Image (cartoon, rainbow, N blue to C red):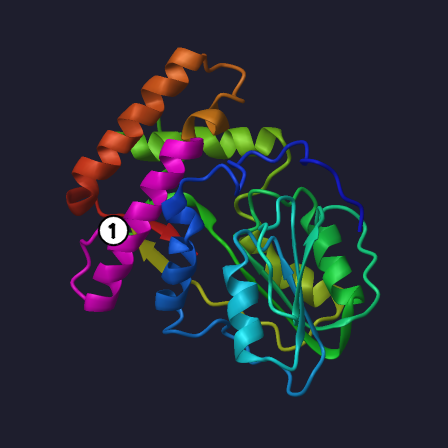
Amino acid sequence: MATQDFAEGYVMTRSDKVPALTKSDLQHKIWLLTLDGHLTTASLPNGAGHVLDIGTGTGAWALAIAKQFPAKQIIATDLTPPSISPPSNVTFVKANADDDWAFGQRFSFIHGRMLASGIHNWPRLLEQCFSNLEPGGRVELLDICHPFQVENNVATSESDSHISSDFLRWGQVAEKCWALVGLDYRATTKHMARFRDLGFVDVYETVLRWPLGAWPAEEKEKKLGELTLRNFITFLTAAGKNIIKQHPCITDQEANKLVTAALKDLRENNLTKKFSLTM
């Protein structure tokens, strides 16, 4: 797998530039709560073997799965892998998942979480997953899907010129900017067909909701909403302006204004507008 210093078209803030709260794996904690303490929705094949974690970020998932399955060897790739000393069954590799893969072995399990900000060619990535799996191996991808939602689960139309929410407006502009650099934040809606076309069997999809704020009545969702709101505010503060500055019709001043307004909307109105993310 070829490597490079940093990938052209990658629009998120680098993992080594994100504030400490996110780097200490708040997002990992959110996923654990979402999956009721489990690291995956699919079971890992028994025995030894190799596991691939694409876009490992802080390495939280790779380290946790290595501890749970000490007989397995974990290879965790990222554009900016963590600079820590991992246990003996974890190897961090600096790599771009969009490039050709050249691993020395096949994998019994391939995992990818929150990859939408870095993958420019999803059909190619899924092809490489298929060709790098052992017979009977499994792939699990967990990601966000746009657009942002409100509590009644009605998506905001891109043609709607009367959006009353600055947060939703930022999301629309951001998605257009991501598309300009070849990123598809609705790729998850196409995964099922692509997996089946490649020859995968036992393909299934689970759609989840991440509330933004403690507005749900159910206790687990309320806690999930609190954590997700903290995580998204951290993300929007760190990367929100840089993402929408790529839009050819938005000035630096306009980008600042929209991000400021989106953060205000998210902080002050999350309980009444009841925002959520589709995962």
Q: Which residues are magenta?
A: 212-239
| Label 1, residues with CA under 10 Å away: few <14, some 14-19, many ≥20 | some
**Residue shown at 62% from the left, 44% from the top:** 80
Q: Position of residue 159 (x, y in %)?
A: 41, 30
Q: Is residue 29 left or right of residue 175?
A: left
Residue under pointer 1: 151
Farthest bottom residue in view: 47
**Residue nearest the observer in this picture, 246 or 195:** 246
The answer to whether any part of residue 208 appears in the image is: no
Q: Residue at 77% x, 76% y: name it.
A: 134
Whole-percent x, y for residue 182 in the image: 64, 35
Magenta span includes 226: yes
The majority secondary structure of the magenta stretch comes to: helix
Q: Residue 192: percent from the left, percent from the top? A: 60, 63
- Among the 4 quarters of the image, the one containing residue 46: bottom right
Q: The residue under label 1 is which amino acid type? A: Glu
Q: Is residue 114 depicted above or below 257 in this figure?
A: below
In magenta segment, residue 97: no
* Image quarter hosting the C terminus: bottom left
Which residue is rendered at x = 40% and y = 19% of the image?
255
SS for dot 1: loop
Image quadrant assignment for residue 207: bottom left
